[in-house]
């Protein structure tokens, strides 16, 4: 099995910064995409930032120029540096990874979620 363990998150004032981190562990042969999704109350889960194994990134328009995603392919970790946070960034943030594991097929895995709350 594969586990994604998140850290970071919390409460911050508007304009502040937070960093989320996620480590993947378990029976991992390879990881394709890693990234972060978020879900606010009453809304659908949305993609925030994704990064391929080769370093290609994709950001939601709402976070471009404010958030930066990093990845360590050796340690199987992904981080999200969030700057200039806005109240509308308030949500539960979920780590994501597409993993080639013991099943010998690509599967999607999710972290347990970490809350980010931005006060105005």
Image: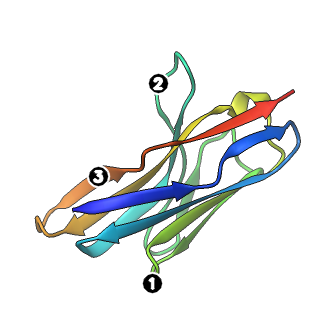
- Residue at x-position 84% and y-position 45%: 84
Query: Which mark is first along the chain, 1 or 3?
Result: 1
- Residue at x-position 87% and y-position 27%: 120
The disc at residue 52 is none
Residue 116 spot, x, y in % from top left: 66, 39
Query: In the rendered image, which quarter contains the N terminus?
Result: bottom left
Q: Is residue 120 left or right of residue 65?
A: right
Label 3 and label 1: CA atoms lie apart by 19 Å
The disc at residue 108 is 3
- Residue at x-position 44% and y-position 60%: 34
Tags 2 and 1 in contact by the CB under 8 Å rule? no
Q: Which residue matches tag 1?
A: 74
Label 2 and label 1: CA atoms lie apart by 32 Å
Classify 10 Å Cα crowding around label 3: few (below 14), some (14-19), many (20 and above). some
Judged from the image, the secondary structure of the residue bearing numbered disc 2 is: loop
Judged from the image, the secondary structure of the residue bearing numbered disc 3 is: strand
Judged from the image, the secondary structure of the residue bearing numbered disc 1 is: loop
Q: Which residue matches tag 2?
A: 44
Residue 25 spot, x, y in % from top left: 35, 69
Please tell me which residue lies in front, 73 or 62. 73
Q: Is residue 56 above or below residue 117?
A: below
């Amino acid at each position: 099995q594969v586990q994604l363990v998140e850290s970071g998150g919390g409460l911050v004032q508007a304009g502040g910064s937070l960093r989320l981190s996620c480590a993947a562990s378990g029976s991992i042969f390879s990881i394709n995409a890693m990234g972060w999704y978020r879900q606010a109350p009453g809304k659908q889960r949305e993609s925030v930032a994704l990064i391929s194994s080769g370093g290609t990134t994709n950001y939601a328009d709402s976070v471009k120029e404010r958030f930066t995603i990093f990845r360590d392919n050796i340690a199987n970790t992904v981080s999200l540096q969030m700057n200039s946070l806005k109240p509308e960034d308030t949500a539960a943030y979920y780590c994501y990874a597409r993993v080639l594991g013991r099943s010998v097929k690509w599967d999607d895995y999710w972290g347990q979620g970490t809350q980010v709350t931005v006060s105005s």
